[in-house]
Amino acid sequence: MAQLSKKELLEEAKKQSEALKRISRWRTYAMVLSAIGVAAAYMGFTGSEHRTAVGVTGVVLILAGVVLAVIFNMVIRTGRENVEKILNAAEK
């Protein structure tokens, strides 16, 4: 594999950092999805009229949001480690 120049390494680190910012926004959307799910589950399972379908949908939204947030957290952590490795390689 060809050695990359310091300039190329720094450019790659910048691109990956920008991608991590976008993924961080997606993680926020996943958390909002979970919050909407909590509201829907609460509305569906409480009150005088039981709206089971809304409650079940809320639980599904909660689970989907949590799973997505966990995946995005893992991606962000790994991405930050990669950026750090690239920057360390650029310093050598």
Image (spheres, rainbow, N blue to C red):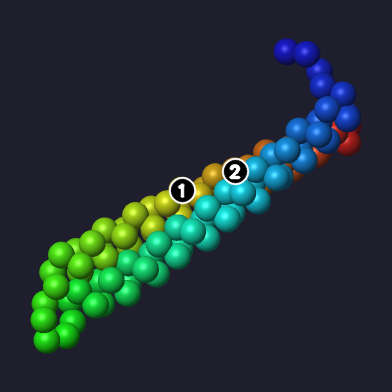
Disc 1: which residue: 71
Badge 2, how many Cα within 10 Å: few under 14, some, many 20+? few
26 to the left or right of 13: left
Amino acid type, residue under disc 1 in the picture: Ile
Whether residue 51 sits left or right of residue 25 in the image: it is left
* Label 1 CA crowd tier, 10 Å (few <14, some 14–19, many 20+): few
Image coordinates of residue 59 in percent, x first then y, are 25, 64
Which numbered disc, 1 or 2, marks the residue that appears first in the sequence?
1
Q: Could you say which quadrant of the image residue 11 lies in?
A: top right
- Residue farthest bottom in this picture: 48
Q: Measuring 33% from the left and 63% from the top, which residue is drawn there? A: 62
Dot 2: element = helix
Q: Amino acid at mark 2?
A: Thr
Residue 79's x, y, as percent?
63, 42
The disc placed on residue 78 is 2
Asked whether the viewer can see residue 69, the reply is: yes
SS class of the residue under badge 1? helix
Q: Residue at x 18, y 82 (%)?
A: 46
* Residue at the image point whose x is 46% and y is 48% from the top: 71
Horizontal and vertical percent position of residue 92: 88, 32
Task: Say whether residue 86 is visible.
Answer: no
Horizontal side of 64 relative to 41 (left or right) equals: right
- In front of the other: label 1 or label 2? 1
Viewer-proximal residue among 76 and 59: 59
Residue 6 lies, in percent from the top left, at 88, 29
In screen coordinates, is 36 left or right of 15?
Answer: left
Is the Cβ of the residue at disc 1 closer than 8 Å to that at disc 2? no
